[in-house]
Amino acid sequence: MTAAHCINEVDDYRVELGKHSLKATEEGSVACSAAKIITHEDYNILNDTALIKLSSPFALSDTITPACLPDRDVVLPHGTPCLVTGWGRLSTNGPAADILQQAFLPVVGHDVCSQPDWWNVLATEKMVCAGGDGITAGCNRDSGGLLNCPNPDGSWDVHGIVSFGSGEGCNVLQKPTVFTQVRLYV
């Protein structure tokens, strides 16, 4: 899955599995072409989600493992630590990462994220916010990346898809990274 705003009709898409470095050839990584891409029929700033069906099956390994989908009724409590990953910019107007970046961001509850001095009405019930401390956040080009949250049994659930961040730059205080809330689309 990815963000619908990352998809356009003219590109051929390839999904890299088990990839850590964008520049290096890595043993165990697998590239699959997209057989079909389905964007949400009502996509706009809301419903920013798309599914990519791979053209061929692949084997699980030490670097390719599944993540689970959350139950539809699971609402992440404020402060829950979840992991965002991506190859986006390393800082505002900075270079894009060559190595996969990852950071734990605390979930910001909707009642906080939708306050006027946070995201206000842009943070809807169909979104989940994480970060906002002014230090660590998703950045430009992280769009479509996932927000994974650990479970007590060691498994991970995909709770969000990076949708947007602040136009003021990366790591803006009280402007957490905003994710499409996956549980509502299961």
Image (cartoon, rainbow, N blue to C red):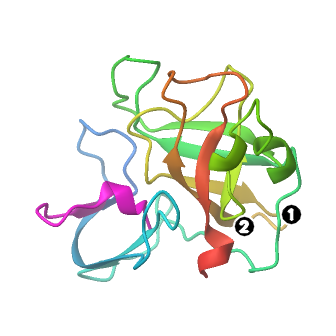
Decide: is 3 above or below 170: below
Q: Which corner quadrant holds the N terminus?
A: bottom left
- Residue 166 % position (x, y): 54, 31
Element type where label 2 sits in the image: loop
Residue kind at label 1, given as amino acid type: Pro
Q: Is residue 69 visible?
A: no
- Would you name the residue on which mark 2 appears? 155
Picture quarter containing residue 54?
bottom left
Tell me the chief SS of the magenta region: loop
Residue at 43 percent across and 54 percent down: it is 144
Q: Is residue 92 above or below residue 85?
A: above
Where residue 186 is drawn, which disc sits there?
A: none
Residue visible at 66% across and 75% down?
184
Q: Residue at x 46, y 67 (%)?
A: 49
Left-right relation of 182 to 150? left
Is 168 part of what is drawn in magenta?
Answer: no
Q: Amino acid at mark 2?
A: Ser
The answer to which image quadrant residue 21 occupies is top left
Q: Nearer the viewer, residue 6 or 46?
A: 46
Horizontal and vertical percent position of residue 146: 54, 55
Screen quadrant of the C terminus? bottom right
Q: Which residues are magenta?
A: 1-15
The secondary element bearing badge 1 is classed as loop
> Up-down: is 180 above or below 87?
below
Q: Gap between marks 2 and 1, in whole Å?
A: 7 Å
Residue under circle 1? Answer: 152
Left or right of residue 141: residue 36: left
**Camera-nearest residue between 135 and 104:** 135
